[in-house]
Amino acid sequence: MISLQCLRLLQGGQSLSRADMARALGVTRATIGHAVAELATAGLVLETPTPTPERIGRPGVALRLNPQGALFMGVEIDTRAVSAVLLDLTMRVIARKVDPVGDTFHDPKAMVPRILSAAQSLAAHTDPARLAGLGVAVPGLVGRHGQVVNAPLLGWRNFALQEALQDAAPATWQIDVCNDAFAFASAERAADLEPSSLLMVLLAEGVGSAYLDEGRMISGAHGFAGELGHMIVSVHGKSGALETMAGAAGFPAAMRPGWSVAQGVADVLATANTPETLAALDLWAEALAIGLANATHLLDPSRIVLGGPLSVLYPAVADAVTQRLSALMLQGHAAPSLHLARYGGEGAAIGAAARLRARIFALPDLGKSPSATPFPTAPVVPNRANPASRALRQRTTS
């Protein structure tokens, strides 16, 4: 347990001495020494000399995360492409791959080897002993055991994706399947260690969201909370689901066959001053403002973070969205601040990998309630073959 607590002190990327850790945890230097030895043996931390000009003698030693101590793969699925990233322990993307899916996205069974192929192409360049596993982000309702209950954009219903991937993947891989907005929120939460009330909005082919209350993700009774895209709104006289008006379908250039949404958005930006694109942006800004106003009245977040491939377009409509959002707010209810996500268009894929990373740092939460957990996750099948998996096993058996 002390080893995990030491590891948590380093998760934000900072360097600390053994004395710093002992003070922070209220234990002896000897206790910290034993814990750090375990972490160093597992390859999760590194020692770095920290010479100080005013001090004579041997330089001090600081501890930091070993970037190569554990590696995590994340995949995002949509109707255009399978987008994969390889993440190190410090949240740095060290490799990426995008594979067009063609018409196979309709068939979840056919997509299993496509997902694994993208992941294996990244895994081929890593040390297998350091590869913790694969996280997959899906645009739709995903149950707590990684089963895709309903993914309307993909046309999937009641498919046990996590189980299918686990059966087909190398035995040493951990597999975790989750909703794409939850994955995106996991990426942002991993980079923002200060608990706060955040609404994360994923703007991709559809629209998803996740709500963090003081750092805890609110998942709902069945793990389906945050389906903002299925909110019914009326925009310029047309009524429908928010994701039909604020998703990628409103920008034909972003939906080219064989292109990912992120690749298509680059074309939208290149034609930003044409009448067609300006009209599409106007509709998108209005729909986004209405959806965010409804969500704000319901959840009262302090901040809203926009991510996903379409978020690249937000600066072009920022003034229009903030003005319209303020105008729609109930008197006395201030509009939350709007921010762009750190990880932009890759947020869901990075977050899928970050969910596995989070388990290495997680301590048992004895007082948690079923509807408010830190990153709701499906059960992990322990893998005893490598250090990264042993770290995950410590978390799941503590």
Image: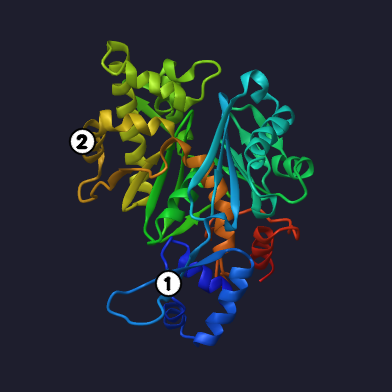
Q: Nearer the viewer, mark 2 or mark 1?
A: 1
Instruction: Note whether 11 is above or below 322 in the view shown.
Output: below
Residue 83 x/y as whole percent:
56, 33
Query: Who is closer to the viewer here, 317 or 289?
Result: 317
- At 32% from the left and 12% from the top, the residue drawn is 276
- At 68% from the left and 43% from the top, the residue drawn is 147
Q: Residue furthest top?
A: 275
Instruction: Note whether 299 is above or below 48 in the view shown.
Output: above
- Looking at the rendered structure, the kind of residue marked 2 is Gln
- Looking at the rendered structure, the kind of residue marked 1 is Leu
Residue 155 x/y as whole percent:
64, 27
- The residue singled out by tag 2 in the image is 323
Q: Quadrant of the C terminus?
A: bottom right
Query: Who is closer to the viewer here, 225 or 344?
Result: 344
Instruction: Note whether 391 is above or below 316 in the view shown.
Output: below
Q: Are marks 2 and 1 in contact (CB under 8 Å)?
A: no
Q: Quadrant of the N terminus?
A: bottom right
Give the quadrant of residue 213: bottom left
Residue 123 horizontal side relative to residue 257, left or right: right
